[in-house]
Amino acid sequence: MAGVIAADIFGGVVANALCTCKRFYHVPLKENEVGLTRRLKNPYFFSALHVYPLLVALLFPPGDWLYGVVWYAALLTSTVIALQVPLYLQPPMAFLLITLAITTNFYLIEPVPGFKWLGPLLFLKIVYGHLVREEPYLPLMEPGV
């Protein structure tokens, strides 16, 4: 299970940074995109699927539920925060949230042994890699303005 989690997180950090991946997730839904594809394009749903901190807390000793719940809640909260700021501020907000996650990982939450990488890399994968669009935007160029 640790290998599956690691493969998804490490691979996702890279894959979510690809232009093709960003184009897939950041274009409007097409009529033929239904079911799971439609749900995966919802950034809140996509973030919520990443229950890895909870799985790690459940499956690996010492079974630290505080670790799992705090990291999962932080990921969901960061998703909401990152998507609520104007589009042109999403990249710096994402980096602020990732910086807070790294600092939290070092100083506030004792990682489950063997999973020191999980929180920070999960934030890189989701908060920056998945949520942030890669085109340059100015404040007046936001959709709907």
Image (tube, helix red, strand yellow):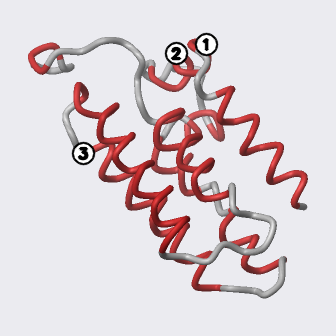
Report the amino acid beneath label 1. Thr
User: Please, what secondary structure does the residue beneath circle 1 have?
Assistant: helix
Left or right of 137 in this view: 98: right
Q: Position of residue 55 (x, y in %)?
A: 75, 70
Q: Position of residue 85 (x, y in %)?
A: 21, 41
Residue bearing the label numbered 2? 23
Number of marks: 3
Residue bearing the label numbered 1? 20
Dots 2, 1 in contact, CB < 8 A: yes
Q: Is residue 21 above or below residue 77?
A: above
Q: Identify the residue shown where x is 24% and y is 15%.
A: 137
Report the amino acid beneath label 2. Arg
Dots 1, 3 in contact, CB < 8 A: no
Label 2 vs label 1: CA separation? 5 Å
In which quadrant of the rendered image does the N terminus lie?
A: bottom right
Report the amino acid beneath label 3. Gln
Q: Identify the residue shown where x is 50% and y is 19%.
A: 30
Q: Position of residue 39 (x, y in %)?
A: 56, 42
Dots 3, 2 in contact, CB < 8 A: no
Q: Which mark is residue 137?
A: none
In front of the other: 97 or 79:
97
| Res 110 → quadrant | bottom right
Left or right of 18 in this view: 102: left
Label 1 vs label 3: CA separation? 24 Å
Q: Is residue 9 above or below residue 112?
A: above
Could you classify mark 2 by the number of other residues whose Cα lies within 10 Å: few (under 14), some (14-19), or many (20 or more)? few
- Tell me which numbered mark, 3 or 2, is placed earlier along the sequence: 2
Q: Identify the residue shown where x is 58% and y is 24%.
A: 17
Residue bearing the label numbered 3? 84
